[in-house]
Image (tube, rainbow, N blue to C red):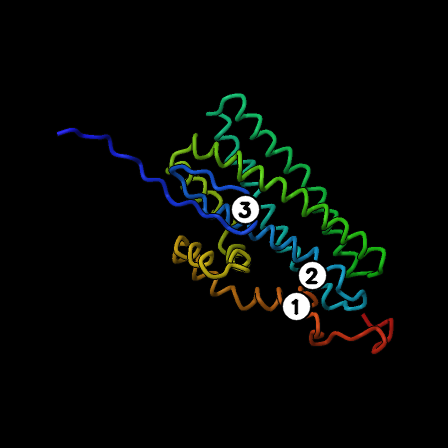
Amino acid sequence: MTTHPARTAHPIQLMLPGQAAAPDGPIDPFMMYVLHHGFRRDLADFAASVPVTPIDDAGTWRALAQRWTMFGHALHHHHTGEDLELWPLLLERCDSTEQAVLEAMEAEHDEIDPLLEECAAGFARMTDHADAATRTALADALRRAEEVLGRHLAHEETDAIAIVQRRMTLQDWNAFEEKMAKRAGLAETLRTCPLMAKGLQGPDRDAVYARLPAPLRLMIRLGGPRFRRLDGRAFYYTTRADHRPPGAHRASERPMTSR
């Protein structure tokens, strides 16, 4: 009887809307893809909301600023973890071509950071002293951030994750994700993890929830109501453009000094 070597079964890779690639391999980096989906979606939501949010609606600008802080913390945690934990491990195992890709990952993070700071400053100014020029500048910064981050995420999904699949073991990846979870901490995870689930529908949502560990599903459920209240308030003018949020007034309905 002829025997054949057993084949290593690779997991079915997750492919979400907007994602550039999902390289095949022994590791299932689904959480990376879920976070990328959330980052893309958030920046698109901010870019759509800022131009249509009335300048004098101070309550919505406060909510947008708070929601931006949540987004910024999540993205900063993600990029910092990659720079400190993931890329250094891979660099030790890579050839020169792969090293160039990973060095580009860090350089792209450095390109993104000033744009995020520019957006944060714009939201702060709109909260304190809103005006049309600041809103226009903020909308422009968000469009640039959306383009630069989108290009980086596509590069990471296409080339960097392919290196992960070639150079890391499943044990390596599990250890990396454990370190990322410890860096975030329980309170931050509870506050921001509902961000991951927003916008997932139908088969995409089913595929993600089938992979999520039970404790994380519980935190998404527990943190969901608070997240949805803030999210709905921040993005009110794009989610329900024909209505006004509670407490919001047209400029003609309140004094200019009411902020």
Label 1 element class: helix
Amino acid, disc 2: Leu
Of callouts 3 and 1, the N-terminal one: 3
The residue that appears at 54% across and 38% down in the rendered structure is 82
Residue 212: percent from the left, percent from the top? 41, 54
- Residue 19 is labelled as 3
Residue 197: percent from the left, percent from the top? 51, 58
Q: Quadrant of the N terminus?
A: top left
Assess whether mark 1 and mark 2 are in contact (beta carbons under 8 angstroms): no
User: Where 190 sits versus 73, above or below?
Assistant: below
Residue lying furthest bottom = 253
Question: How far is the residue under mark 2 from the one under mark 1?
Answer: 8 Å
The residue that appears at 75% across and 56% down in the rendered structure is 124
Q: Quadrant of residue 129?
A: bottom right
Q: Nearer the viewer, mark 3 or mark 1?
A: 3
Q: Quadrant of the C terminus?
A: bottom right
Q: Left or right: 4 with respect to 132?
A: left
Of callouts 3 and 2, the N-terminal one: 3
The residue that appears at 52% across and 49% down in the rendered structure is 184
Q: Which residue is mark 2?
A: 64
Residue 240: percent from the left, percent from the top? 66, 70
